[in-house]
Amino acid sequence: MDRLPAVLRVLHDIATENSGERSVDARGLLTQLDLSFVSLDTFRRLLGDAKVLSDMLQSPSLDLAMAVDLISALKDSLQEYRSETFVDNLWASIVKTAIECSIAIQSPEKKRSQKVSSRLGGSVITST
């Protein structure tokens, strides 16, 4: 996440080149990097804490009392993550990253609406 602006700049530079498949791949990656990608920072934070606990629980020098304390600390952290202030701060961080990377915060509207076939309009399918 720290290097996301640099990665996007490199992809943009490659996309503007006339290098065939390489620029097509870069354009494809750029179209997939949207607000939902930046929102994955939520999982990075949540799963990062769980990974730290997992690594510590695998330590051979860990005793039962310390393991209980570590699990309790993770439960407290996860309970804190459920608060509105944490969610607001997390959303502010996601929006800030999106703005830094010139990623649209509003999702684009559908490009075209789905039309029901004139043959199937008004019919009900009851079996395959």
Image: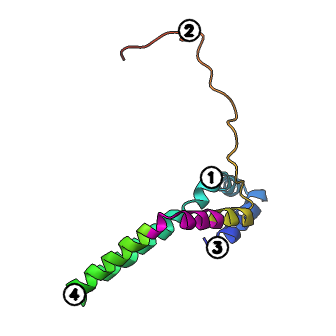
Q: Main secondary structure of the magenta part?
A: helix
Please give the residue where the numbered disc 2 appears in the rendered image: 119
* Quadrant for the C terminus in the image: top left
| Horizontal and vertical percent position of residue 67 | 26, 81
Query: What residue span does the magenta drawing correspond to?
Result: 80-93
The quadrant where residue 66 appears = bottom left
Label 4, label 3: how far apart the Cα atoms are: 38 Å
Q: Measuring 60% from the left and 10% from the top, which residue is drawn there? A: 118
| Horizontal and vertical percent position of residue 28 | 65, 51
Viewed as shown, does residue 103 lie left or right of 45? right
Residue 58 in sight: no
Dot placed on the residue nearer the N-terminal end, 3 or 1 = 3
From this view, report whether residue 108 is shown above or below residue 85. above
Q: Nearer the viewer, mark 4 or mark 3?
A: 4
**Relative depth, front residue between 53 and 12:** 53
Label 3, label 1: how far apart the Cα atoms are: 17 Å
Determine crowd level at label 2: few under 14, some 14-19, many 20+ residues with C-alpha closer than 10 A: few
Please give the residue where the numbered disc 3 appears in the rendered image: 3
Viewed as shown, does residue 18 lie left or right of 63? right
Most extreme residue toward the front is 84
Please give the residue where the numbered disc 4 appears in the rendered image: 63
